[in-house]
Amino acid sequence: MDDALQTLHPRAVTLWRATAALRGGFLTLAVLAAEILLDLPAPRWLPTGALAVVVAAAAALVPPLRYRAWRWALRRTDIFLRHGILFRTVSIVPLVRIQHVDTRHGPVDRALGLADVVVYTAGSRGAIVTIPALGRAQAEALRDRLAELSGAGDAV
Amino acid sequence: MPSEARRLHPFTTVARALRLARQLLIPAVAGGVSVGGDLRGVLLGTFLILAVPSLVIGAAQWLAFRYRLERDDLVIDSGVFRRRRRVIPIERVQNVDLEQSPLERLVGVAELRIETATGGMEAEASLTVLPLAEARALRSELLTRRGAVPGRGEPEAGQTTLLRLGPVDLVVAGATANEAGLIAAGLATLLEVAGQTGALATLGDRLDDAVATGAAPGAAGAAVVAVLFVLVLLVLGWVVSIVATVVRFHGFTLTRDGQDLRAEHGLLSRHHLTVPLARVQAVRVEETLPRRWLHRVALKIDTAGAGSQAGRGAGGRAQVQVPIAHCRQVAVLLEHALRDPGFAGVALHPVDPASRRRELVRLSAAVVALTLGLAAYGAGRAWAALLLLAPAALLAHARYRARGWTRDAGHVIARDGVLTRTTWVVPEAKVQTLHITQTPFQRRWRLATLLVDTAAGRTARVVDLHRTTAAELVAELGHPAPQHGQGPTPGTGPGPAPRSDLSSPSPDRGDAAPMPPPSRADARDPRPGGPGR
């Protein structure tokens, strides 16, 4: 099995930029609407402008860092995940603990040919683990492989 | 047991109607009053409007509800308009909870709740209400049949009473449930001292003057009023906590019955919870500061589903709570709850010493920020806030000392908390997923927090391990043995553990002295006055 650490699909950067731009864009529009409707005193456009700059900068700079920080591997007995730019998280999901596996893709994922793999365990706080932005075919192959490898029977 | 379909007790109609009415009563009354109309008329009207439909709906639900016990399943048909059949495999039955509200006790009926965990998805069946005798019979039938399923382990004969609590124990439990009583006592002493020195009288006079002249009371007077107010609130909260504990846990009995744990308690509502030991996910030993002084602890025994929606909504039915126990009893309770006779007292490892530095930096940063903030607002002598650095240093040290961890006989043990100290005992065979998190500061000090997730509903954590230790632990814990339904698995993970002195799977039974475990259970600090700042 491929024990080596793997990266996400390179188009993950595009995906995250697109979603960040979309969300930030909506937020900026909302602030703009508030500014116009409430007829705020001068300096006008300043909050909107500042927000637009921050959103644009975040959408441009953060996704590549996030992509660089993401590693995952399907190992002999578990799934390994590591991610986080500042707050780093390593997760281990033993294969026998997997309850079921999903692939998930929103409209933007679909447009880019990407999908998330979502792994469910019977745990509490860390019960649902997601490997985001894999290539569509790879995600589906991984899902089927995990479903096959996961423990049959009582995992509680 | 015959497999013909059976109805619930006719009192179900009233029970359901009351439940429905309770949900609708307050909004209905509020609505009526807001529309206009005197309270009595509104209440009478509400009663008439609610009573009839509630009873009709209750009766319809009672008529539609049928259950029958088949060879392997409990089958429940319900639903007035949308018929619904639920089939519960008896071998999946987890916790069986028999409950009686005061009214139900008068009528002689009981609610029987059956929790199952089918692949982590929680399903709850509730038989509301059955005649008490029938509820008892059904419960024991379910438990016997479940026990007879092969692979569950031989049902052991005989019952052992593990713990019985009297009223005095429960008063102590309520009184020490949190630090409110302590703080109240401290405040009262403060006021007493102030009163004896005459300061209070002076302040009181000044307050009276201020009230008389209509002027705002001075800062000192306001402070006394605030302190008195807080004191009253604390004492009230304390009394409520004591009364609630006594009422809820009256007649608490914890019994080991073969492969089940049974808890019975309640003054008004009677609870009778049965939990299969194979489903115990974690045990939490909780010690508030006053409890540590009295050598008492509280225990929470979590089973799967404690964190699920059903478990939460049902008020923690997936959890056996031991409101109070002497620290000498903890070893025995843990042995039974975790089915591990070799569970001997172990000393905990401290976490990485850098933890103290990290806490010191964090707390100092807060103090400095406070000082700068005060200075920015132009407060005189803002630098005096820097004096808080001394208690900050002590708190940092206390936080570091409160943390500890070890592995013992197939269990992960983790302790944390300065005031209320919580010690987790997690069977390694129950570990679901493992996580290591690092904040930027933790990365700088090469520290990491280890999260050990089980189906218990909460996640055990060890804060500020050295990152290498955390990685080693994850590597060892991340290889659960295939499930055999039994608890601890000796020798987890391949190869010798780096700290083999601790992970020796079965300590010599002869060495398991009748002494209380020094560190885990008792958790007293060897230095007097050491913890609890």
Image: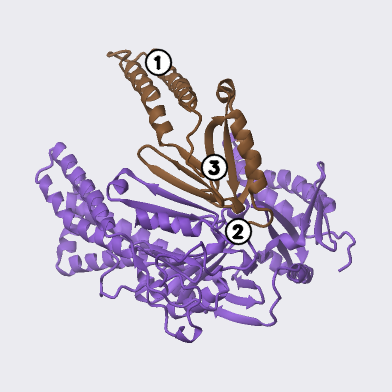
**Number of residues whose C-alpha sits closer than 10 Å to that of mark 3, classed few (under 14), some (14–19) or many (20 or more):** few
Q: Which residue is denoted by mark 1 in the rendering?
A: A32
- In the image, what residue occupies the spot 29% across and 61% down? B400
Q: Mark 1 lies on which chain?
A: A
The one nearer the camera, B416 or A111, is: A111
Q: Is residue B322 left or right of residue A38?
A: right
The residue under label 2 is B304
Residue B254 can be seen in this image: yes
Report which colour depicts chain B: purple
Q: Position of residue A2 (x, y in %)?
A: 54, 42
Quarter location, residue A36: top left
The residue mark sitting in front, 3 or 1, is 3
Mark 2 secondary-structure assignment:
loop
- Amino acid carrying mark 2 in the image: Ala
Numbered disc in front, either 3 or 2? 3
Give x and y (percent) for residue B410: 51, 68
| Chain at numbered mark 3 | A
